[in-house]
Image: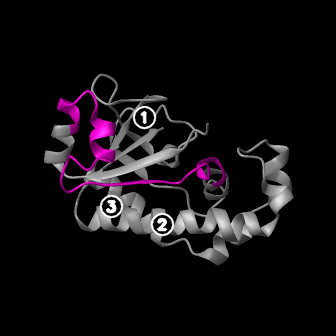
Amino acid sequence: MSIIATYVRLDANGLDKCRENPHWLEALCRKEIPGVELIDIDKACDGLVWVLERMPAPAPQAVEGAGFVLQSSLASLLQGGTVEERRLKAPYGPASRLSPQDVAALSAWLQAIDADLMRSRYNAAAMDAEEVYPEIWSEEGLAAFDDYLMPYFQNLQAFFLRAAEAQQHVLVCFT
């Protein structure tokens, strides 16, 4: 069984429906809450965070909140957010929420990062030395970047762009 990072984009009404439902994650997966998009980035989260932490420009500061507890999540790059401790429990800790303002800032930062810049920061040997999960980097070499990390990053970029354009919240949790 793998732990994967899951992202949900939703408006305020969808957020309220999730908060009211103790089985919110299952309801999202069954598409019982309209106007919601849910994606995951498989086990690529730690690898993406490792590469993105090495970008020349740091991730933006969050507008609201006290900080994330999801230290291995992409959301941890954005210092802030709101942990939904009592309302949105997930299999591996509570979900964290990015406000529409935080989503817009993070999306703008992500949109400025291209494949060449990402590739220039990728270092399989260093990632394995630091035991970056799932520890496939040296074995797979550049294919781990091209065929695994980069497609998930591009999906995440597009996801955050759609969320920003729709002025939505994003929930982040581990499933």
Which percent across, then down, holds residue 95?
38, 35
Cα separation between marks 3 and 2: 16 Å
Q: Earlier in the sequence, mark 3 or mark 2?
A: 3
What residue is rendered at 21% in x and 46% in y? 32
Which percent across, then down, holds residue 117?
65, 73
Q: Which residue is mark 2?
A: 155
Q: Residues within 10 Å of mark 3 (few under 14, many from 20)?
A: many
Of labels 3 and 2, the one closer to you? 2
Most extreme residue toward the front is 30
Q: Which residue is mark 3?
A: 104
Q: Nearer the viewer, residue 61 or 103?
A: 103
Q: Secondary structure at mark 2?
A: helix
Q: Earlier in the sequence, mark 2 or mark 1?
A: 1
Dot 2 and dot 1 residues touching (CB under 8 Å): no
Vertical arrangement, residue 173 with respect to residue 110, above or below: above
Q: Earlier in the sequence, mark 3 or mark 1?
A: 1
**Amino acid carrying mark 2 in the image:** Asn
Asked if residue 123 lies left or right of residue 88, the reply is right
Q: Nearer the viewer, residue 33 or 51?
A: 33
